[in-house]
Amino acid sequence: MSSATPATPASTEDPIAARLRTLLVRAPTAVAFVRGQRFEVVSEEFNHLFGFNDDGELAGQPTRLVHTTDMAHTALQERADAAFAAGRPLDEEIEYVKRDGHRFWGRLQASPVHWDAPSGESLWIVEDVTAARALRLQPTWTAKHDAVTELANRREFERRLGEHVGSRRNEPVSVLWVDVDRFGEVIKDMGAEVGDHFLYGLGQMLISKVRASDLVARLEEDHFAILLPDCDQHYAQIIAEKVRSSIASYRLRWGLHRTRVKASLGVVQIQPTLVTVDAVLGGAALACTEAKAAGGDSVRVFVSAGGYEELAG
């Protein structure tokens, strides 16, 4: 007589709690839940970031433990309280101290777990930005990058574009000009600080839509440009349409603030009639102006002096 294999008893742990526990152990992100200036729950990566292991977890410890001074800790709490009360998360670079006394710079992104109770439990996400911060402080980095978006600035974009203008190489090169539609309304409704965070997020999204060999830059205000080496007009149109669609579906989330925008794009391929950097950028900008004049959220292609080709958007 054969006997049935006994069934394995189902776990009685709450599924949501089990998922959170797994996330805190396995995710390569330093995450902590904070209440009353104490760490309630911390991820494994959060412990490791501050030099704590299983024999000395940060859970239950005061948040003062990871700050350099009482004054720095108090000032941070005051800034967080003010931001949360205004419906904004806190996003700052802060000097922290590890368990062994070693100091490092971390980017803290903190927000209330429940926005209707901003003084209650909050979520902290910390990233070590020591190396990135040191790089940004170098004069060479500052000279080539935009401070808000951390993308290449106009000077660097023009320098890189200049390497292709007039080149005798047979490699096709194209440029996209991106102009966010009605961005002034975002600034008016949500404020300059939210606008800056939106521009940063938009810049990071643009990077994710192009190749590693391409260059994304912020030229000015809400105007971006993308340099596409080894890319002819046909493929530049495809990329432009993908970028347009991605911007249209991109949602800004910054605390309680939510908004969507659209963009107009101009496309130009470097050609013999465009003999200077200004001429190439001018062609892309003119095509973009035509897209905006058509109502925005569309793409236009510069084909010759004074000529445009419409790409449905």
Image: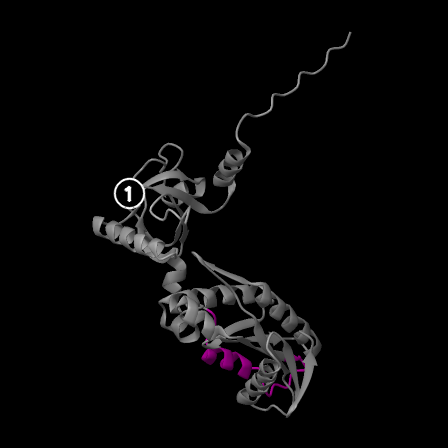
Residue type, numbered disc 1: Leu
Q: Percent from the top left, x then y, of residue 223?
A: 50, 77
**Location of mark 1 (residue):** 65
Colouring of the image = one colour
* Region in magenta: 151-173
Q: Percent from the top left, x then y, of residue 16?
A: 53, 36
* Viewport quadrant of the C terminus: bottom right
Tell me which residue sits at (39%, 69%) in the image: 192
Q: Is residue 44 placed above or below 266 in the rendered structure? A: above
In the rendered image, the residue lying farthest to the right is: 1
Q: Percent from the top left, x then y, of residue 11?
A: 57, 25
Q: Is residue 71 visible?
A: yes
Q: Percent from the top left, x then y, of residue 32?
A: 40, 43
Q: Is residue 200 placed above or below 287 in the rendered structure? A: above
Front-lying residue, 253 or 137: 253
Tell me which residue sits at (63%, 76%) in the image: 298
